[in-house]
Every structure is written in C-alpha cells, then in structure tokens.
Image (tube, coloured by chain):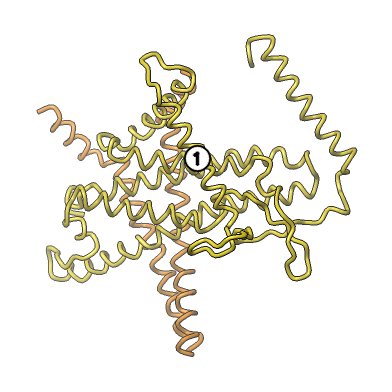
Chain colours: A orange, B yellow
Amino acid sequence: MQKWRNLVKQQDVRDMSYGCALASQVGLVIALPTLIGLSVGYWLDMRLDTLPWIALALTAVGAVLGPVIAYRWVTTAMRHRFPPREQVEQAEEGNQD
Amino acid sequence: MPKTTAGRLGCVGLIVVMLGGCVGGLLLGGIVNENAEMPAISLAAEKLQLPFELPLLGHGLPNTFPATWLTMLILIVLAVVGTRKMEMVPGRLQNFVETLVETFYGFIEGVAGDKTRMFFPLIATFFFFILVANWMGLLPGFGSIGVWEEHHGHAVLVPFLRAANADLNTTIALAIVSVAATQYFGLRTQGLKYLRKFFTVRGKAIYERPINLFVGALELISEFIKIVSFSFRLFGNIFAGEVLLIVMAFLAAFIASLPFMGLELFVGLVQALIFSMLSLVFFMMATVSHDEHGGH
C-alpha cells in the first residue's frame, strides 16, 4: 500500500493527468463552438425561413472563436500550473521576509 | 504475486475458472452464435415502465436512475460505515477509507496548495461518484438483465440498469454543478470583482476598452462551452465503451471482450480523473484574481 501511495504522490502522475485534462479540453473547445454555431444557426434559419445564411455565418463565427478560446485557455491554464520564473522568485522572496 | 500458498492457489483457481468459462462458452454458445440477435443500442436511456406515476417523470423511469441511486448508496454506506467508529488505530474498513481519502487529498494538494480544504469535498465527490458509476457499469447485470418489450414490431430488451454516465442527463447535471461551483468559488474569494472577468470596459489606452469588452464576452461564452464539453466528453467516452463492449460480446463472446473490459476499467478511471482535474483547474483559475497576473 505504501508503494502505491508513493507512486500516486509522484509529480509525474499529477502532471500527466493535468496534461490529459488540458489536451482533451483543447480538442473539444476547438470543435464545439463550430458545432454550436451551426446548430443554433440552423434552428434560427428554420424559424426565420432564411436557410442557409444564418447557419453559414454562425458556423464561421464559431470556427473563428474556437481556436481563440482554446489559445486563451491553454495560456492561462499553463500560467497557473507553471508560473513564470520571475513570479516564482518573487513569491519565494515574499515568503522569506 | 500473493505470498501465501492460499493466495497463490486462489489466483490459479481464478485463472482456471476464467479459462474454463471461455472454453465452455465456446463449446456451448459457439464463437458466432447465429441465433443471437444484436441488442438495440439506444443513445438515450431506455425507459422502464412503472405501474404507478411519478412526479415529473410519468410512467417511464430512465434505467440510469436506479444505477445513479445505487452509486450514491454505495458511497454513502461506505462513508458512514467506514467512519462510524473512528479509532486512532484504524480497523480494516476505516483504514481502507482513510487510504483512499488521504491518497486523493495528497494528489489534489499538489495542484491546489493552500486552497485544498476549500475544494477537496466537491472534487473528491466528483471523482468517487464518476469512478464508482463507471466501474459499476462493467459489472454483470448492467445492460443484460431486463424485460422484453415490443417496439415497432421488434422485441427489445430494456435493461433494469445502465451505466449512470451513459446518459447525457447525468453528465450534464455533473457539468452544471461543476461550472456553477466555479462561479460560486470565484464570487466567494474575489467578491464582485470576479464579475469583472466577464464585463469590463476598463483599459490602459482607449483602444483597449472595446477589446477588453470582447474578451469578457469570450469568457462568458467559454463558460457555456465548458458545460457542453464537460458533459459530452464523459458521456461520449462511457457510452462508446458500452457500445464497444456490446459489439465485442456479440462478435466473439468471452474472448474478445476480456481485453476491452480492461480498457474500459482504465477509461473509467481516466475519465473520473480528468473530470475532477479539470474542475480543479477551473476552480483554481476562478479564485486567482486577474490583477495578480502582471496586468494580463
């Protein structure tokens, strides 16, 4: 049991699951806005009888937003987990005082 | 490897029983059973017909419902029985529960640091609920024991139990709880300043203000995308696993299913880990003030 506990406490396993979570979220965040845009646009088109214009426009909007959101998400998430060197040093200095 | 003779004998016995089951299945059922009918795979949870009427649900009870309650029952009973007679020198069950909780606590502490105590109850509940629900769905009886019903002239098996996370309703509920908790933790630690993330017209230069407004709108949209991505990932993985197992069982019974059972055990663990880890990351990101990051 002790062996298993040591294994789980290792930084590697934690970083691996963090990476898995990050990667799986990135894939979905790129794909989903496009699909959501398409379905919302299609629904609006059906109601307003303007097929296919709103669907096309919202799909394009979603396709642009997806990668932008994914980029912002990855940069902030990585900054939280692995803060820049200056910040770490600042925090360490703050702790010493 | 177990060290005692009895343990070794037990291991060997287990393997013999499994192999015997394989061979027996081959002899009795044949690898390809031509009479076996593929069960209807339904994307939505099948409805069990009840003799009485329930509020909101009517006569049909989704078959993931009993599975969800069974999961809750297992977790609650384990927690209550494991902590009923707390002692300094723990007994067998208390030791088991403590090991589970301590291991996961240490795991979260490495990411959350001093905020672990605030996040741990919810994150651990997510993890253990999803883990138990996923693994329970692999037990015999799930998806195989049920009643035959007539649908469009075909006899369809409606199982009594179905893996809880193979229903989009369960995973959406989990996702909404997670995203709502993110907002709660954000508001609790930062106060109304937290809402500045979504609605802001401030900026150093004039031309930055509309950009910041747009970025705030992006953040708001991504909160909703989070609900969809959380729920679809969990549902997709678990439902795909169910379908995979059904297909494998009907292609070549007993033999082909075994490695995929192992795969599904792994997938169930990884999905539980990913769900709780992502929730934790979002909680962390919501509780750290925006200004602390060098004006970003």
- Seen in the picture, residue A66 relative to B163 is either above or below; the reply is below
Asked if residue B226 lies left or right of residue B73, the reply is left
Q: Report how many numbered discs are placed on residues in the image.
A: 1
Q: Nearer the viewer, residue B115 or A74?
A: B115
Task: Give the residue at the far right of this rendering.
Answer: B27
| Residue B293 appears in the picture as rendered | no
- Seen in the picture, residue B90 relative to B108 is either above or below; the reply is above
Q: Residues within 10 Å of mark 1 (few under 14, many from 20)?
A: few
Q: Residue at x 14, y 64 (%)?
A: B203
Question: Residue B126 sits in which quadrant?
Answer: top left
The amino acid type found where label 1 is placed reads Leu
Q: Quadrant of the C terminus of chain A?
A: top left
Q: Residue at x 32, y 51 (%)?
A: B181
Q: Nearer the viewer, residue B125 or B78?
A: B78
Q: Residue at x 48, y 64 (%)?
A: B56
- Seen in the picture, residue B3 relative to B277 is either above or below; the reply is above
Chain for disc number 1: B
Residue wearing tag 1:
B73
| Residue B281 appears in the picture as rendered | yes
Asked if residue B54 lies left or right of residue B254, the reply is left
Asked if residue A49 lies left or right of residue B251, the reply is left
x then y, percent, for residue B30: 88, 43
x then y, percent, for residue B16: 79, 24
Q: Nearer the viewer, residue B281 or B91?
A: B91
